[in-house]
Image (spheres, grey):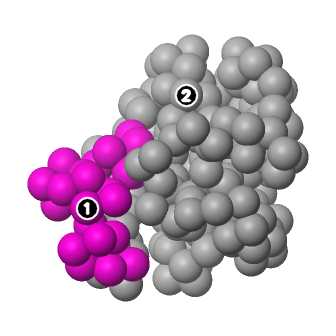
Amino acid sequence: MAPVGENRSRKLIGLAGFMGCGKTTIGRLLAQQIGWRFVDLDTLIEQTAGLSIPAIFERLGEAAFREIEHEALSRTLGEAHEQARAMVVALGGGTIAQPANLSLLRSAGCTVIWLRCPIEVLLSRCATITNRPLFRDEASFRKLHEERLPFYEQADYQVDSSMEPRRVVEQILALDYFQRVVA
């Protein structure tokens, strides 16, 4: 694990949160505003596997998906380190719920920001989406959210992502993290 000082000075951010919290939208806006590279881990997984995430879950199962996810995260963090590139990574909804991934993020010096959003807002955002393999019904959605909360709470920072994406980006830019690394 990286020393705390090193962890806080690295230009590497992972956006974590439950499905529907806005990781991709906010990550893309944030990276664009600060001039960092943006990587969407789910998109990278789909490109690498040559399958959509629902197809990976259906054909190979969640365990195989988690292995592919871990490898994609490892490659992304390694690339950021090797190229000394400032990067914003939109993590998958369950990425940090896997202890090996959280360890990997910590050892890479990645600052994790939880895009916290009330469950009712998440439900309304995801209600019409059909490509989420772990969203079967409202009860399972709520249960999965509850199971993942302890992992999200381990993030270095949290911001409210229930508002318009540009306002969420403003909250992120106001974090003391940016006073140290972007200035």
Which mark, residue 25? Answer: 2
Which mark, residue 118? Answer: none
| Residue depicted at 76% across the width and 26% down the height | 168
Reply yes or no: does residue 103 show up in magenta: no
Q: Which residue is mark 1?
A: 55
Disc 2 crowd, CA 10 A, few/some/many (<14, 14-19, 20+): some
Q: Pick the quarter of the image with the N terminus.
A: bottom right
Q: Nearer the viewer, residue 141 or 67?
A: 141
Could you say where residue 29 lies in the image, as x and y percent from the top left? 56, 20
- Give the magenta part as a residue range: 39-62
Instruction: Say which of marks 2 and 1 sits in front.
Output: 1
Disc 1 crowd, CA 10 A, few/some/many (<14, 14-19, 20+): some
**Residue 5 shows in the view:** no
Reply yes or no: does residue 59 show up in magenta: yes
Indicate the secondary structure of the residue bearing disc 1: helix
Dominant secondary-structure state across the stretch colored magenta: helix
Name the side, left or right, on which 119 lies relative to 132.
Answer: right
Q: Quadrant of the rendered structure where residue 153 is?
A: bottom right
Residues at marks 2 and 1, CA–CA distance in whole angstroms: 23 Å
